[in-house]
Amino acid sequence: MKNITVLGSTGSIGVNTLDVIARHSDRFNTQALSANSNVALFAEQCIQHQPEVAVMVEENAAEQLKSKIHNKAPDVRVLSGKEALCNIAAMDSVDQVMAAIVGGAGLLPTLAAAKAGKRVLLANKEALVMSGQVFMDTVKNNHAELLPIDSEHNAIFQCMPAEFASGLGEVGVRQILLTASGGPFRTTPVRQLSEMTPEQACKHPNWNMGKKISVDSATMMNKGLEVIEACWLFHTTPAHIEVVIHPQSVIHSLVKYDDGSVLAQLGNPDMRTPIAYGMSWPDRITAGVEPLDLFEIAKLEFEKPDEQRFPCLRLAKEAMQQGGTSSAILNAANEVAVASFLDKQLSFTDIARLIEQVLEQVQHHEADSLDIILEDDAIARQHAKALARGMTV
Ligand code: NAD
Ligand code: MG
C-alpha cells in the first residue's frame, strides 16, 4: 500500500488524482489532502477519502471545514497555514506526494517532499521553473524520485531510455519534440488578440484545466514554462527542444533518436493517464481513460509556432538561456500578469508586454540558493504589480 499526499486536491489535477486513487483503493491510500479555500468540495473529499490530515491554508476556511466534517469524518486532523503544507509533504508515513498546487505557492511544499526523499509527482511546473538546479539537487541529494505529471513531460519520460540522466547525447537522443495544442487563439487574427476576454482565454479546445494554466495555454507561456521544465527534467537546453503545434492533442510529445527513430506517446487528452503512470511507475494500472480510436481521430496535424503571435514562448526560452534567477523572474511576472488579466485589469496582449518589461528591468542573479530565488521572485512580483497598475485598461 502506498500512502499519498495530494497538495491542491480541489484543483483540476487534484480531482483527477483522487479519481485514480479511488479506482485502486487496494494499492493507494490518501494520507493527507490540502486546498486553499474551496471548503465545500474539500469537505466532500475529506468525507470520501478520510485522510489522516487535511490542510486548508486559510484559518477561517479550516474552521469552516471542521464544522462541516465533524460528523462524517471525525478522525481527520484539520490544520491550517503554509507550514502545514510542508509538513504533510514530508510526513514519515507518506510515500508519494502529488504536487498539484498552482504557481509559486507550491514551491516550498514540493521542495519539502523532495527533501524528505519522497516520490514527487510533479504537476506544479512553476516550482521547477523557479528553482531549477536547487530543485534537481534536492531531489538527487535526498534520493527522492521525480516523476513528471505534465502530459508532455510524462510522454517524454515514457519515450526516453532509462539511463537518460547520464546525458541525452550519451543515450543517442538528438532532440525532444514538445507538442502544444496552440490553445484557443491559434487561428485568431493577431490584431484581435488584444480584445480577447478571460472567458475566451479559458475555453481550451482539448483540456479542462485551472484558470491560470488555461490562460498560460492561450499565451503559450505554458509551453515556454514547459521548455524550461523539460530542460531541467531531461538535462538538456532549449536548443535541443522543438515546440510543435499539434492541434488535436493526441501525441503528447516525441523523442528523436540518432538512428532516425522517433518515439511518441499517444493517448486521449485526459490527465488521469499521466497521473496513473506516475503513481504506479514502473507498473501500469487502469486510469479510467478510454483507449485511443485512431479511425475516429483520422487526422493528425503539425505546425511551427508563430513567435509573433506568441511572444511568451520566446520570452521563456530567452529567460532559460540567460540562466540564474531569470526563469523565476519570468514566472513571477507571468503569475502577476495572468492574475491581472483574469481581474480584467490588463488586456490579453499586455501579459507578454508586462513580462518583457519585468525581465528587462529586474536584475537577475546566480540561482545558487533558495533564498536568492525567493528574493528575486518577490522583487519581480512587486515590480510587475507596479507596472500592471500603470498599464490598467
Ligand atoms: P487549479 O487552479 O485547478 O487548482 C489549484 C489547486 O491549488 C487547488 O486545489 C487550490 O486550492 C490550490 N491552491 C491555489 N492557490 C494556493 C495557495 N496559494 N496555497 C495553497 N494551495 C493553493 O490548477 P490545476 O489546473 O489543477 O493545476 C495545478 C498545477 O498543475 C499547475 O502548476 C499546472 O500548471 C499543473 N498542470 C495542470 C494540468 C491540468 O490539466 N490542469 C496539466 C499539466 C500541469
Ligand atoms: Mg502540459
Image (tube, grey):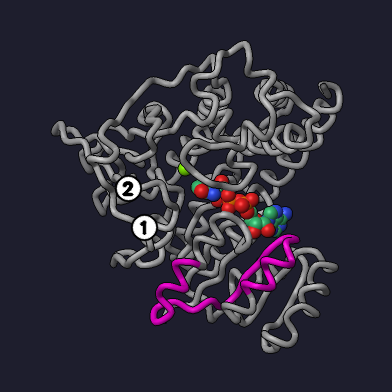
Q: Residue 334, relative to residue 159: is it above or below? A: above
- In what element is the residue under mark 1? loop
For this rendering, which residue is in front, 381 or 46?
46
Above or below, 14 against 362 in this view is below
Residue 354: name its quadrant: top right
Q: CA distance from mark 1 to mark 2?
A: 9 Å
Q: Which is nearer the eye, 201 or 282?
A: 201
Magenta segment boundaries in residue numbering: 19-45
Numbered circle sitting on residue 380: none
Quarter of the N terminus within the rendering: bottom left
Q: Earlier in the sequence, mark 1 or mark 2?
A: 2
Q: Residues within 10 Å of mark 2 (few under 14, many from 20)?
A: many
Quarter of the rendering containing residue 37: bottom right
Q: Which percent across, then down, holds residue 255? A: 28, 38
What residue is drawn where x is 63% and y is 18%? 193
Q: Residue furthest left?
A: 259
Q: Position of residue 131 (x, y in %)?
A: 58, 46
Mark 1 touches mark 2? (CB < 8 Å): yes
Residue type, numbered disc 1: Val
